[in-house]
Image: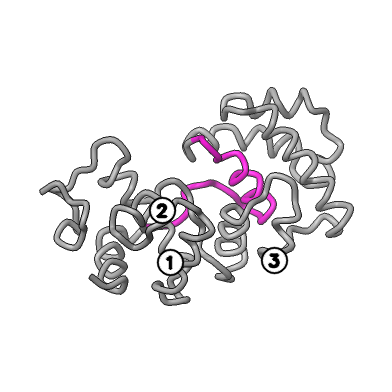
Amino acid sequence: MTMDEIISRLKDEYPEADTTLDYETPYELLVATVLSAQCTDERVNKVTPDLFDEYPTPEAMAEAPQEDVEELVRSTGFYSRKARHLREGAQTLVEEFDGDVPQNVNDLTRVEGVGRKTANVVVSNAFGTHEGIAVDTHVQRLSQRLGLVDTDDRDGIEDALREQVPREDWGLVSHLLIFHGRATCTARSPDCGDCVLEDLCPSSRV
């Protein structure tokens, strides 16, 4: 089994694979990605229009009352923590980066609420720079089922994938695995019989 074959098949299966978060600016993508933790992109997309209307910039969010932000993001879950991260993260953007979203992973991970996964999503999708591979629950699950990694550590998974995936596909591979994880290789009931990778997958139930 080669990574090239996996990527080729998934590209054919999901030619539309891309982020499903709605955004217009790097800051909006950053906020949406923070909110997407343990929440569906569909739910985030319902919340962000009102949030961005009220607090469209880091400067505005940095001055926002905690309770107001909590109310706006309540339906995304873990709303107190997410609201705090958005506010404190915005303050860091204003104080350390002149209100701009950093264009590299190392600087972005200095912002509250931003880990490597979020930083990779923003840098790749907002700026077109692929410094790493975003590893969410779908990417972790599929990488393990396909036998591409033998660790539960997300940094370790990213390192292993970076060694196997051509750099030009670092941004795309996350989207491909996420789309496949949502459509076919679900957490509880993977549809192995209708999977384009079935013959390559050591976890296939067929």
Which mark lies nearer to you, 2 or 3?
2
Give percent across and percent down for residue 61.
Answer: 79, 39
Q: Classify mark 3: helix, strand or loop.
A: loop
Q: Is 191 in front, or is 22?
A: 191
Identify the image quadrant of residue 189.
Answer: top left
How dense is the environment of label 2, judged by Cα within 10 Å: few (below 14), some, or many (20 and up)? many
User: In the drawing, does residue 111 fall left or right of residue 62?
Assistant: left
Q: Which amino acid does the dot numbered 1 rest on?
A: Leu
Cα–Cα gap, marks 1 and 2 = 10 Å
Q: How is the image coloured?
A: one colour
Residue carrying label 2: 139
Which mark lies nearer to you, 1 or 3?
1
Give percent across and percent down for residue 157.
Answer: 46, 59
Q: Is 147 in front, or is 38?
A: 147
Q: Which of the numbered marks, if any, corresponds to residue 161?
A: 1
Say above or below: 189 vs 139. Answer: above
Q: Which of the numbered marks, if any, corresponds to residue 103?
A: 3
Identify the image quadrant of residue 191.
Answer: top left
x 80%, y 41%: residue: 88
Answer whether labels 1 and 2 touch (C-beta < 8 Å): yes
Say above or below: 160 vs 60. Answer: below
Q: Is 205 in front, or is 30?
A: 205
Q: The magenta stretch spans which residues?
A: 17-39
Mark 2 or 3 closer to N-term? 3
Say above or below: 167 vs 94. Answer: below
Q: Classify mark 1: helix, strand or loop.
A: helix
Identify the image quadrant of residue 67.
Answer: top right
Q: Which amino acid does the dot numbered 3 rest on?
A: Gln
x 76%, y 38%: residue: 55
x 47%, y 76%: residue: 167
Give percent across and percent down for residue 165.
Answer: 40, 72
